[in-house]
Image: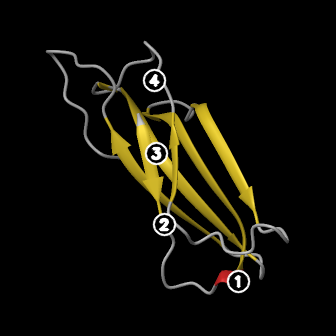
Amino acid sequence: MRCSYQVDAIAADAIQSVEASILWITSGKGEEDMGVHEFHRRLRLVGNPDLRALHEFETWLPNSPLSFGGTIVKLHWLARVRLFLQEGASYTQDLSFQLGSHPLFTVEAP
């Protein structure tokens, strides 16, 4: 899987760090569970002052757990980008995708 992201509409000096990850979460009955498959953190440093530029990363997706859209429990895969600002606020953007296919179930976005 190849992912790319770019930050717009925020000043370069306002961003402290950017995290990008590929993860899965469960929803439905019981407690929510989560597993992180891939994780990247970029910090605003002297040599890397502007974290807004287009950034790409690649990962091989695992064989499991597969996306699942059951009536009691659902499992969703996400590509997530989180911005952490100097003032302490954070913003998260998720993009859901399906891993694998199962003929009896369809997966809906969380």
Question: How far apart in space, not on screen, are marks 2 and 1 (Cα)?
Answer: 15 Å
Instruction: For marks 2 and 1, give the one nearer the viewer.
Output: 2
Of mark 1 and mark 4, the one earlier in the sequence is: 1
Of mark 4 and mark 3, the one earlier in the sequence is: 4
Q: Which residue is mark 2?
A: 6
Of mark 2 and mark 1, the one earlier in the sequence is: 2
- Nearer-the-camera pick, 42 or 68: 42
Q: Which residue is mark 4?
A: 61
Q: Is residue 58 left or right of residue 48?
A: left
Q: Which residue is mark 1?
A: 14
Question: How far apart in space, not on screen, are marks 1 and 4 (Cα)?
Answer: 33 Å
Q: Which residue is mark 3?
A: 79
Determine the secondary structure under disc 3.
strand
Query: Which residue is at a point 49% across and 85% down the rendered structure image?
Result: 9
Question: How far apart in space, not on screen, are marks 4 and 2 (Cα)?
Answer: 22 Å
The kind of residue on which mark 2 rests is Gln
Task: Please rate how many residues cluster around mark 4, counting C-alpha atoms within 10 Å: few if below 14, some from 14 to 19, many from 20.
Answer: few
Q: Is residue 42 left or right of residue 21?
A: right
Determine the secondary structure under disc 1.
helix
